[in-house]
Amino acid sequence: MAMRKVAVVGAGMTKFMRRAQETGRELAFQASRMALDSCEMTLDDIDAVALGTAPDAFDGLHMKGEYLSDGAGAWHKPYMRCYVGGGTGVFAAIQGWYHVASGLFDTCLVVCEEKMSSCMPHPQGAFLTIFDHTTERALKPNLIWIFALEMNRYMTMHGIEKKDIALVAVKNKRNALDHPCAQLAANITVEDVLNSEVLAWPVQRLDISPTSDGAVAIVMAAEHVAKRITDKPAWVRGVGWSLDTAYWTSRDLYYPKYVEYAARMAYDMAGITEPRKEIHVVEPYDPFDYKELHHLEGLLLADKGDAPRLTAEGVTARDGNMPVCPSGGMLGVGNPIAAAGLMKISEIFWQLRGEAGKRQVPGQPKTGLAQSWGDLMQVGCVMILGV
Amino acid sequence: MSANVENFPGTPLSQADFDEGKILTTHWKPKLEYGWDAGVAISRYLAELKNGRIIGIKCSRCRSTVVPPRVVCEWCWEPMDDWVYLKDTGTVNTFSICYIRWDASRAKEPQIPAVIEIDGASKGAGILHLLDEVNADDVTIGMKVQAVWKPADERTGAITDIRYFKPT
């Protein structure tokens, strides 16, 4: 395949908030403008725009891509909206990547936005519609069911205890104290997690990321443009994405095979044969604390069932051998769904450029990985950046 | 760049902003109604539930038997049309003890949703349903369970024709 080299050259984001005064299009504009300003580009320099945003039901707006298009700077440009549920953030960046890698465009602005607070009383109500209308919805499920079912399966298959998993929430919320956009940064203890309200056992209140409003944008450019724009481009070394069966009750939930497939695709493209040595900083998708562990295993960065041990031993701490979610992740920074995935790419971008401030991981990382996950617990999206 | 930015954009709202009437909000309650056709495979599944039976379907190529039935084998991408009656018993694959309803409001008595592998289907092939007639603390993965049906004259051809599963 003759693909061009593509780099991330700029990034911007809004605060992540429980409820923002700004509308979705206003948030999209703020993040997009900041991303362009960060690399001293203007909208005239952008050839195409890729947008990611979650179900229209959150906003009560049909055709959200069109709604957000002015804030995303999309008018009179080739524009697309993509959507794979929670996986949308990294998926949108992958769209941006092949817009440029294909040779069709030299630059692409990637924008992800979510305003979940509009859905009353709680966006849970909108999540109901992801279940099969005939065979499942009559049972009145809620979204947390499937997480609780998956978490229980994961814990039982490996003999993992809740206190082992709670360490992830403690770590990520603490990391988020250093993120200026964080919504739920906190110094909490394992006991706080274990004593928090039981929602759907084994899922408790502090195991979960919040619902959020927010937007993130990045600028992607072909090699010859990127080198003009910055002396620190973060090159896209590999991308991967994979979808598993929608019959989620027939899949063994203890291991995310589709994440492994996505990761293998990205590692192959990047020429990475020993990911545990070659990936220096990781932002896996962490809407729930156990998901960080589940995904580290799917990404082949931990043996099956062994990610809790790495966490307990500090390997995944910000100053550990393999820092995981140094941003504070979705548990700490917040979870405006599509924007949260793109936040992870921005974090890797800032980490690789040594611009993450108090969040900076030591040792000048050269290669980082961001991953998102979604649809009906069945899609994995991976992007590897390198400097 | 992140480190050089002092003020990230975005204006978080507080309860006080609403109490003081600073925020203007428009509300809308959609009234939408849908009628979902069950389709070829699920129609037969529902008809058999009305008869008090669980039916699955088998792929003649890879011999996987799955439930709920479907018209295409997801592994072989071949048509599936070999109907197989399954038992109304199974094994708990995973479960949760849930205190919140679909809209995130709180319930006093927990529900116990579970994935139940149905006997007669291929290993791992399960359906989503509820457990009852069991103390939540006594439920385990691997537990054997059996369907509790509505009386025949109350069955409508729906997944809720099985009221719940209980331990055998």
Image (spheres, rainbow, N blue to C red):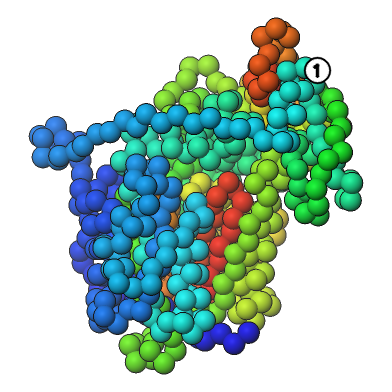
Q: Nearer the viewer, residue A96 or B81?
A: B81
Q: Residue at x 33, y 73 (%)?
A: A77
**Residue B158 screen position, x and y as percent:** 65, 22
Q: Nearer the viewer, residue A247 or A324?
A: A247
- The residue carrying mark 1 is B168
Q: Is residue A85 above or below residue A76?
A: above
**Residue A316 screen position, x and y as percent:** 53, 61
Q: Which quadrant of the figure has residue A361?
A: bottom left
Is residue A132 toward the left or the right of residue A233 in the image? right
Q: Is residue A348 above or below residue B60?
A: below
Is residue A2 toward the left or the right of residue A30 in the image? right
**Residue A15 screen position, x and y as percent:** 28, 56
Q: Is residue A169 above or below residue B99?
A: below
Q: Residue at x 29, y 68 (%)?
A: A75
Asked if residue A177 can be seen in this view, the reply is no
Q: Is residue A38 above or below residue A21?
A: below
Badge 1: residue crowd in 10 Å (few <14, some 14–19, many ≥20): few
State the quadrant of the N terminus of chain A.
bottom right
Q: How many marks?
A: 1
Asked if residue B17 can be seen in this view, the reply is yes
Q: Which quadrant of the figure has residue B132?
A: top right
**Residue A116 screen position, x and y as percent:** 35, 45
What amino acid is labelled 1 in the image?
Answer: Thr
Q: Residue at x 38, y 72 (%)?
A: A78
Q: On what subunit does the disc labeled 1 rest?
A: B
Q: Residue at x 44, y 23 (%)?
A: B106
Q: Which quadrant of the figure has residue B149?
A: top right
Q: Nearer the viewer, residue B111 or B39?
A: B39
Is residue A100 toward the left or the right of residue A2 in the image? left
